[in-house]
Each structure stands twice: as structure tokens, then as C-alpha cells.
Image: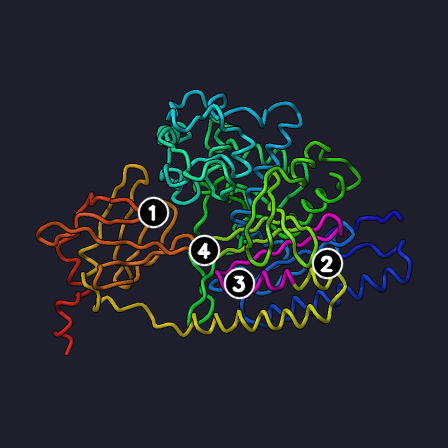
Amino acid sequence: MRRRHLLQTLFATVSMTQQRPGRASASASARANLRALSDQAWASGAFPGFQLAVLAERRPLWSTAHGMADVSAAQPATEETSYYIASTTKCFTALAAAQRAARGELDLQASLAQLLPQVAWRPALQAERITLRELLTHTHGIAADSVPAQLRVNFSGVYRDNAELLQWWAQAAPSSEGKAFRYSNMGYDLAAMAMAPAGRDGWKMEVQRDVLDTLGLRRSSPWRSRLDPATLAAPHVDSAQGWRSLPANKQDRNMGPAGGMFCTASDLGRLIQALMDGGRLDGRRLLSAEVLDLMLHRQVTQSRTVWGYERFGHSLGFDMARLHGQEILTRLGSFRGAQSHLSFMPAQGLGIALLSNGDAVAGMAGERLVTAIYQCLLGDPAGARLALGEGLKQVQQAQMQWRAAPPPAPVADWPLPPGALAGRYVDEQLGELELAWTGKALIARWGVLQSECNLRSADQRQWRVDWSGQGVLVEVLSDASDSVIGLRMMGRAWWRAVPATSDASVLAPGRASAGMRG
């Protein structure tokens, strides 16, 4: 039966004009069930805002948006709001590589030594035996922590060009686990340089041309600057006072091939549709059979369970797993104040894109919602509502514990005053870190990223920063006179470049003067 496509509206639906009455009634019932699940999730308070697109029979079925794109600016979320998608970016980078490979422009079996001959790789790495395909399937066998400088790509964003980073990549060492599947950003960061070695934005241009332009994804971009700021969702963290928006932690500089795009759920829905419907969109064949074979079929094996997905394999860009007894392809992503989910069940023609601008609480609630939606679409709407209710209770309990946690220790209880810590710290691979006292908080700035420093352990003189959603411990290094000379963070020593100003300690007394407060 042929169906006419309707343009996406506030609630995208499948055209009913040529459907049998029974099918139309079933679709209307499905949308009503989806709306009920979406409203149930929103009422939990676990999201600052989210955007959802659902596909059935390989076509858009329903979509919606809830909440706020930016709480502090009172900016509501709409279906045109673009969200940061973190590691979901990887499937776009992989698809761009697959497109070029299908045209004969790129050899996925080419070795690292062939693709980047200018790098003097360590002999132990055996760069001549590491292929582009292995980089894109997390089976390259490179120890991710052997090149700290690669964190600049997706985190600080501070590096001149690919050549600068490749000087450090030459130190890459083999993993002790060999070429077993091991998920990280490393392979995609290096693959992007191998695919487009000339400039740091080469991968972005390839994704734009071979994926976004090809599939007509108009509200998605690997350049934040190319999207209307008024349509971008701000990152948020949960607090005792509710959701709080954060400064933008993703800019053009730190948008990398392993995590560096803004998208809408409807654009992700178009990608899902093309992958499930033989590469077709809007009546045209846009993805070849060779591309689909790479993206949809297992390239390597894995065995791990994440968020309830029993992962057994990996295609080019997607984790292959089982959920509700069905095979499902997923690509999840998270960063501080951003959660993304893209998944589809090819055999059933079902797909879901869910984007949120919250932290871990929103991520937990989002996965409960996605699981319930699939249960509903597979024929158990009543069970889906019950399961979602139970899952959201667990999320709300975690949220209550989070909000009830003791506040960070006041600076008066710190073992050192903020002024003693303020200054610049440098590591040769990771670059420059600045600690700045604002009079209210000690802020850690690392390139694009910034975070408050909160005391973790007074006895060990450790603070905690959170740039990406995964906290990092910062330990003070002192000399014989107990002056701060550096910091230990991410397993490396950052040496002080600029000492604290002489009057900084007056702004916030440390533990030694606590008795003077009466």
C-alpha cells in the first residue's frame, strides 16, 4: 500500500488518507499510547526538557517536545530545538566513512601507517596492521590512555591543527588486551584524522556533505556556530533548587568526531528511516546496499550489558543488542547536561530518537521511557505503562537522594584558601588549566570547558571538578614550604605557571582562620 508523506508538524504522524479504517484506528491508538507514556515521563520531573520522535512501519509515527530548552532564559523546548548528541555523533562519522568507501574514495582496510605516513609510530604499535575499519569498530588495540593529548579533541578543544596532535599520537602504545573490542573515543578521533588529515574540520565537512546534506537533515550540524543560538538547548544539572542551566560546554572547537554534533529528534528519525527502509527517503534511494551492509550488519563481536541492552556485536557506528527479545541497533550519548538516544529494530520497522538537556537523572529516565515505548509498540501498552511507572519511581528516588545530598563544603572549611590555588597550570600534552576565584566559587577552566571546584577530601587536599558528566579529582602538589606548585589530575602532573596573587587569600579564609569567625 502506498502512502503519501506529510511534512513534519508539531505531532508528526503517518498519513491516513489511503489506509484502511482498521489500520488508521490502530495508528491513532498507538499515538495515544505514546502520548500517555511521554506525559508520564515528563510528569516525573526527571527532565528539564526533552524531544522525542518515534517510527513504526519504517515511517514517522509520532513526535513531541516537553519542557524547557533553557530554564534560566525561560526558553521553551520545541521540536525545532537542537540538542547536543555527544557520542551519538559516532554513527554520523561512521556513515560518512561508509559513503566514501562505497564510492571507492576510501579503503576501510587501509592501515594506519598508510593513511598517516607522516607519523613516526612506535614499532610496538604495529601501525601497519591497524586498519581504518578497526578504528571505527573499537578493535584497533591502541591503549586509549597512552595519548592524553587526544582529550583535547572532544574536551578542551585547544589545539592548532591535526599535525600538532599527531606529534603526540606518535607515542601511542598497544593495549594489553590486544584487539579485543574496547569502546572509547580514541578510534574515531584518529579515524577522522586519517580520513581528512589536512585540517581539524575535515571530518565535519565530510559529515555535512555525505550525511546531513544527502539525507536532508536541516537542523543538525557539527558546527554549533551554524545553528541559530535561539534554537539550541542549554545543558542543565539537577540541584536542590531544581534544574539549573550551565554555560555552553560545547563550541566549534571541541566538537569532535566521537562526540560533536547538535541535532533534532526528527532529523535523527530521518536517519533511522533511511537505514531501515533500504536507504530510501522522500521517494529516492540515498544510501547504497554496500553502505547499509556496513551500517546494519555485525562487523565485530562484543559481550556486555549497558542500560539493559545485551550487546553482542558492533556494526560500523552502532552497538547491536537485544531488548524485549528483539535485535536492536543503538547509539547512545551523554555529556554534562546532555543525553541522547538513537535506536531501531530493523526487523520490526521500529525506531526511537530521544534527546534531553539534563544530566544523569534525565539519562536514567530517558532509557526507562525508551524501553517502555518499545514494549508498547511491540503490543503491550498496559505493561509498558506499569514498567515505566516502576522505573520512574527508581529514578525519582535517586533524584531525591541527589537533591538531599549535603552541599559542598564552604570555602572556610577548605584546607587551603581559594587564593592559594588560583593561577594557571600546564601539562605538555593536556595544555593549560586555569583556576580562578570569583569571590563565590573557584572555577576550573580547561579550554572551552569550565566547572566549579568542590572540596572532596580535606585530609588528602583533593577537589572535584565536573566538565563532562564524569567527575575528575584534583589533588594539590606542594613543595617543602607547603606552597602549591602544581596539581595532579587525570594521572598527570600540571605544574603551576602563575602564582596566586598576594591578596587573593583575604577574599576567602581557609581552615587556619576559621576560629576568627566567632
Q: Which residue is mark 3?
A: 362
Q: Is residue 462 above or below residue 513?
A: above
In the rendered structure, which segment of residues is drawn in magenta?
344-371
Residue visible at 51% across and 34% down in the picture: 135
* Circles 1 and 4: CB atoms closer than 8 Å: no
Percent position of residue 165, x then y: 38, 32
**Identity of the residue drawn at 73% across and 53% down:** 350
The residue under label 1 is which amino acid type?
A: Trp
Q: Secondary structure at mark 3?
A: helix
Image quarter of residue 293? top right
Disc 4 packing (10 Å; few <14; some 14–19; many ≥20) = many
The crowd level at tag 2 (other Cα within 10 Å; few <14, some 14-19, many 20+) is many
Nearer the camera: disc 1 or disc 3 = 3
- Name the disc covering residue 446, or none: 1
Compared to residue 202, the image places residue 261 above or below, namely below
Which of the two discs, 1 and 4, labels the residue nearer the N terminus? 4
Q: Is residue 362 magenta?
A: yes
Sequence-first disc among 1 and 2: 2
Q: Secondary structure at mark 2?
A: strand
State the image coordinates of residue 393 (x, y, percent, origin top left): 56, 73
Front: mark 2 or 3: 3
Q: How far is disc 1 from disc 2 in space, using C-alphas?
A: 41 Å
Give yes or no for contact between labels 2 and 3 (Cβ–Cβ under 8 Å). no
Which residue is found at the position 50% from the left and 32% from the top? 191
Query: On the rendered structure, is 268 left or right of 28?
Result: left
Residue that carries the numbered disc 4 in the rendered image: 336
Going by the numbered disc 3, the residue's amino acid type is Ala
Q: Which mark is residue 62?
A: 2
Q: Earlier in the sequence, mark 2 or mark 4?
A: 2
Query: What amino acid type is highlighted by mark number 4?
Result: Arg
Q: Quadrant of residue 172?
A: top left
